[in-house]
Image (cartoon, rainbow, N blue to C red):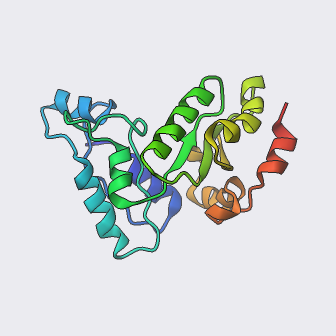
Amino acid sequence: PDEAGDAQEVARLAGTATVAEVARFPEPLAPGTAARRAGRTPVRPEEVAEAAAKLATEHDLVLVEGAGGLLVRFDAKGGTLADVAGLLGAPVLLVTSAGLGTLNTTELTARELRSRGLELPGLVIGSWPGAPDLAARCNLADLPDVSGAPLLGAVPAGAGSLSPAAFRSAAPRWLAPPLDGTWDADAFGDRHGP
């Protein structure tokens, strides 16, 4: 409770953004585990969907960030972020890691989204290293293949430590036009690929 959370960090970096937290637990664990260990009521997917739907009545764009991944359990009944997306009928932008191991988790997540009839418009690499290794460079070509979705951006490692003004100025260069940016996957792959 005495530390800034993800919502506050988004507000700090984005500037004029409305943020809302449905719940915050003392330990950084899967939501269901964190609630159980804190002796608190877990968050239900319906609560998250209701909060997002309420924000959507006042805003053109609402982003819902998941904790831990698409299938990490919110509660003992097995509610997940995938259930939230289904309740909202919302597309899911998949944020992936750059390096070794990401192909498997990305493909499994993409398959699960499709099996639930959820839209996957694309992928964003959540932390592109300053000195990418061979796996990260090869993954630029492999991630779209295994997911069946295009790369729509790559956020450089350490971006969250930028000042808000520097972050907002640079962010369009990290995201592709479908996300209102100028990032070009082909050019990025030519520059950083193997």
**Is residue 123 found left or right of 3 in the rendered image?**
right
Q: Residue at x 52, y 56 (%)?
A: 13
Examine the image and state in which quarter residue 82 appears. top left
In the figure, is residue 176 to the left or right of 28?
A: right
Q: Is residue 176 visible?
A: yes
The residue positioned farthest toward the bottom in the image shown: 58
* Residue 97 percent location from the top left of the image: 60, 34
Q: Position of residue 146 (x, y in %)?
A: 65, 35
- Say left or right for 25 vs 111: left
Residue 157 appears in the rendering: no
Residue nearest the observer in this picture, 87 or 138: 87
Residue 134 versus residue 129: which sits nearer the camera? 134
What residue do we see at 32% from left, 30% from top?
29
Q: Is residue 36 above or below residue 185?
A: above
Question: How many numbered tags mark residues here?
Answer: 0
**As rendered, which of 37 and 47 lies closer to the eye?**
47
Across and down, in percent, residue 115 comes to 45, 43
Q: Quadrant of the C terminus?
A: top right
Q: Quadrant of residue 182?
A: bottom right
- Which image quadrant for residue 144? top right
For the N terminus, the quadrant is top left
Residue drawn at x 14%, y 40% is 41
Residue at 68 percent of width and 61 percent of height:
172
Q: Nearer the viewer, residue 83 or 102?
A: 83
